Image (cartoon, helix red, strand yellow):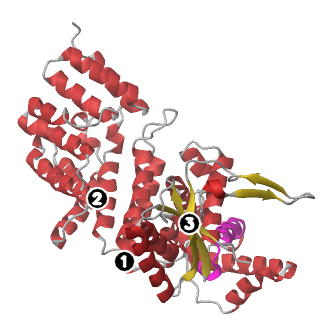
Amino acid sequence: MTDVGAAITRAHREEWARVVATLARRYGDLDLAEEMTAEAFAAAVERWPAVGVPSSPGAWLTTTADRKALDRIRREAKRGAKHQEALMLSDAPEPLGVIDDDRLRLLFTCCHPALAMEARVALTLRLVGGLTVPEIARAFLVQETAMGQRITRAKTKIKVAGIPYRVPSRADLATRVTGVLTVLFLIFNEGYLASDPGQEAVRGDLTAEAIRLARLVRDLMPADGEVAGLLALMLLTEARRLARVSAGGELVSLAEQDRGAWDRALIAEGHALVRSRLASGQPPGRYQILAAINAVHTDARDVRDTDWSQVIALYDQLAALDPSPIVRLNRAIAVAELDGPEVALAEIDRLPLAGYHLFHATRADLLRRLGRSEESRTAYDRAIALTTNTAETAYLARRRNQLATP
Amino acid sequence: MAQYLISVLTDSTELADEAEMAAIDVFNEQLTADGHWVFAGGLGMPATATVIDGRDGEPVFTDGPYLESKEFIAGFWIIEAADLDVALRLAAQGSKACNRRVEVRPVLAE
């Protein structure tokens, strides 16, 4: 890539959200903000190769997008007095780009609880992440036109229903931050374990985008423990990405992974975040506990070195916050390592998770370890029937076929 | 300021009981005191509805609601609110007061 090409790519990564957010605040119109930002980047692609990369690409892009927005509003104002209000608003401009919080406002607007979850995900990827509509459509295996409509409908609702462009009030902040983190985690998880059988099992593009967005949120809300927790959780999971799927496209379990293939830099960064949260002395939330569990796993150079009692203690802490059977299922997996498969199986069999593939996969594994092959085979069959991820299916089928035949 | 319609959804012919009426009164007073109040009312059952089509010559009257459904609108508030966040907060209080689900829709500005 040429230097100019690299500069444009970097500017897109670093400045897109800021430009959209600044324009959205100035004009109170997400549509306009998105379109003019896209046009400013198109102008950069056209002009920077000829005139060189400006010393401050962000300022150049914001000014260009802003000028295009003003032109658009003036043009439309001539057609009708309807746009007079917007024009008046822009005649008393606020200074450009000084409030970094604009990106935070944008994020809270995109993740507003009055929008459908799939719309929140799409809007966040488009307006904050700067992904194109075709890119988002591909990521979620939705037709481009359908994805475009989803985004347009969401923007219309924001405008007509009056979803505010601001950071929520103190009373709502904690739940709204949780809402933003849910969207980011959903994006990450879709990349981590794609739910669609037509997709690659692990999608680095989506996990990378989720991490980028989580880093941004962390920059904007450095004091929030759960933001740090989610970023740490993503980093420690991403660190194992290459080791998680074999060359043959089969999921590799944590115990079987080549730990030398883990990304040490990501692990170091994740561990540092977890340590800083521990040092804060504040009670951890869900993501911080999940990050801590992953820190214990990634701390062990060999699976036999895993501190299982620490893992169980953390799951107990998590169960106190979230008494869901899935948490108890995961706890039981650690119990199997510490107290043996029989104890774990007794705990698992009480859980109401008959529709969850990992429940059956876990049972199958415990039954296999107890030498109860026939029951194990039945459990593997159920797990396979409920799984949609190709790598997981391959893994489960191999384990099933390794069972002793009667 | 924008206006929002808060519709009260129900699938039962039971009217609000005494405790619900009392809670609704408290909520209404709060709406008035905080400057959100525009209008509110309870509605007769769907069976009392008449659909009128006056688009073409003599109006045609049809007995019953335009849409037969299990759930229907039992009452409504129209409120003034700065934005949807405020409207949602008030709607949550209204839902609690009348002990039913509600739906919020913006009244279109000119």
Q: In this view, does A264 lie above or below A71?
A: above
Disc number at residue A104? none
Q: Residue A66 at x, y = what percent?
A: 67, 79
The residue closer to the viewer here, A6 or A296, is A296
Query: In this rendering, do the residues under marks 3 and 1 share a single chain?
Result: no
Q: Is residue A6 above or below residue A33?
A: above
Q: Residue A303 at x, y = what percent?
A: 16, 39
> Image point 60% across, 89% down: which residue?
A94
Residue type of the residue flagged with mark 3: Gly
Residue type of the residue flagged with mark 1: Ala
- Can residue A214 be seen in the rendering of this structure? yes
Say which element carries label 2: helix
The region drawn magenta spans: A25-47
> Image point 61% across, 77% down: which residue?
B3
The quadrant of the picture occupied by the C terminus of chain A is top left
In the picture provided, is A371 more to the left or to the right than B70? Answer: left
Q: Residue A176 at x, y = what percent?
A: 41, 68
Calculate the distance from the C-alpha at mark 3 to the C-alpha at mark 2: 42 Å
- Provide the residue designation for mark 1: A171
Reply yes or no: does residue B61 show up in magenta: no
Q: Are marks 1 and 2 in contact (CB under 8 Å)?
A: no
